Image (cartoon, grey):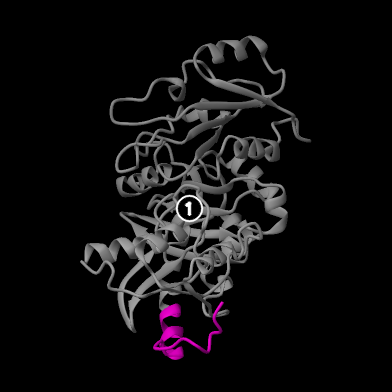
């Protein structure tokens, strides 16, 4: 790789400012892309920025691809010579194609990178591939540190997590001002707390995960469908998972029924204790539901670690936890919640325990708050 002192027409101060801007703007998408890194990229012609791009949501195009698409849309295809990106371009195919291939096909002659991929399985491979075919590769170490731009990605690629992988878990719930997850009697239909704007956002979130996990208590109490409806992406509905130790899920549950005309539902997978309720097991599987028996944990319930590892084997990497306070508490206590999205409605009172103790600032990282219709949304990463 070319030493950072030979950046030709790129002034060091201008380059530092560009990296800072790209990192700051990329970080705005951190909750939408996690566990993937938030990355910013810019295409330059000399010192002029032709187009910028950011990785904006899970499963979507990477920053380099967005920048290339932006240049083409502006009629600037081929009118650039340098790509600046906050993180080493990927060289492997996962949910999207390798960025290195797109960079080569676009004819980019120089790539300036702010940080190497922290994952030891991929570290340096993207840059080596580009160098091998004659691209001028320059690493400006420390210009876009992951500790500042995408610290959650360091957690995702940590040795202990790579060695024993489990999905990234987002805990989502709605609550009243006093922290209850069930509204007070006489409020609406007795089930929903959030307003329509928040409900629409949840549909978008459902459409951008690999699995939705709930507990049998929620199935018995609320009879949810866990489907994806517009404005969510109905083209790839996530796996719907019920943690049900003793197989108490009733065959007539709405979650087990075919989705309606304006919604999409993924396969239903019930995780239970191995050997639980053989007849119910057969009846459920006869209804096209898949049932998987697992070893119980110390509490006698399905082991959460085993459940998450089973979902990993199913291909789930980003999981949405939509359930009641008992199972939410169990996931928090086990250290298996990575990210939260909490909608607080302008309603006082309610029923059941509060999860307020989970939301103190010393337990959370990179906290963000915003208004969604009449609700207040709190997003954060959970401190390990």
Residue at 50%, 88% (x, y): give it: 6
Range shown magenta: 1-20
Residue indicated by mark 1? 341
Q: Position of residue 356 (x, y in %)?
A: 56, 54
User: Image quadrant for the N terminus?
Assistant: bottom right
155 relative position to 297: left or right: left
Q: Quick one: 132 or 306, which is closer to the camera?
A: 132
Up/down of 13 relative to 224, above or below:
below
Q: Locate the C terminus by quadrant.
A: bottom right
- From the top left corner, tell me how far across and down residue 352 is, in percent: 55, 41
Where 77 falls versus 302 (above or below)?
A: below
Q: Is residue 292 above or below residue 63?
A: above
Residue 258's place in the image compared with 176, above or below, is: above
Which x, y percent locates residue 124? 60, 66
Query: Residue shown at 74%/29% (left/top)?
Result: 295
Most extreme residue toward the front is 133
Number of other residues with Cα within 10 Å of mark 1, as a class: few under 14, some 14 to 19, many 20 or more: many
Identify the secondary structure beneath mark 1.
strand
Residue at 47% over, 30% down: 222
Q: Nearer the viewer, residue 164 or 336?
A: 164
Q: Nearer the viewer, residue 298 or 220?
A: 298
**Residue 133 lies within the magenta run:** no
Tally of numbered discs: 1
> Which residue reaches farthest right?
298
Q: Is residue 53 visible?
A: yes
Give coordinates of residue 142: x percent, y percent: 57, 80
């Amino acid at each position: 790789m070319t030493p950072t002192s030979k950046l030709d027409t790129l002034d060091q101060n201008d380059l530092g400012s560009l990296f800072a801007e790209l990192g700051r703007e990329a970080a705005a998408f951190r909750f939408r892309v996690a566990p993937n890194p938030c990355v910013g990229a810019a295409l330059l012609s000399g010192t002029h920025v032709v187009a910028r791009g950011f990785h904006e949501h899970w499963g979507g195009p990477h920053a380099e691809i967005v920048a290339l698409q932006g240049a083409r849309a502006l009629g600037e295809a081929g009118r650039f010579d340098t790509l600046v990106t906050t993180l080493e371009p990927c060289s492997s195919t996962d949910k999207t194609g390798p960025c290195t291939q797109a960079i080569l096909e676009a004819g980019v002659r120089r790539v300036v990178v702010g940080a190497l991929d922290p994952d030891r399985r991929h570290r340096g491979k993207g840059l080596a591939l580009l160098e091998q075919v004659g691209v001028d590769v320059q690493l400006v170490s420390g210009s876009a540190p992951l500790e500042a731009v995408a610290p959650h990605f360091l957690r995702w690629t940590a040795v202990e997590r790579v060695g024993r992988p489990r999905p990234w878990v987002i805990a989502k719930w709605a609550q009243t001002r006093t922290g209850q997850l069930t509204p007070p009697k006489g409020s609406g239909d007795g089930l929903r707390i959030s307003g329509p704007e928040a409900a629409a956002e949840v549909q978008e979130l459902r459409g951008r995960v690999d699995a939705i996990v709930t507990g049998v208590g929620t199935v018995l109490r609320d009879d949810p469908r866990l489907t994806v409806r517009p404005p969510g992406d109905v083209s790839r509905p996530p796996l719907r998972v019920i943690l049900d130790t003793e197989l108490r899920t009733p065959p007539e549950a709405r979650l087990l029924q075919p989705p309606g005309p304006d919604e999409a539902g993924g396969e239903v997978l019930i995780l239970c204790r191995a050997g639980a309720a053989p007849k119910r097991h057969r009846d459920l599987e006869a209804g096209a539901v898949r049932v998987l028996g697992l070893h119980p944990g110390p509490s006698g319930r399905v082991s959460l670690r085993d459940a998450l590892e089973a979902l990993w084997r199913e291909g789930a990497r980003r999981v949405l936890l939509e359930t009641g306070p008992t199972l939410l508490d169990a996931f928090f206590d086990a250290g298996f919640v990575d990210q939260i999205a909490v909608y607080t409605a302008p309603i006082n009172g309610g029923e059941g325990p509060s999860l307020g103790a989970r939301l103190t600032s010393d337990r959370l990282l990179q906290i963000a708050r915003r208004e969604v219709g009449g609700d207040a949304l709190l997003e954060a990463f959970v401190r390990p």
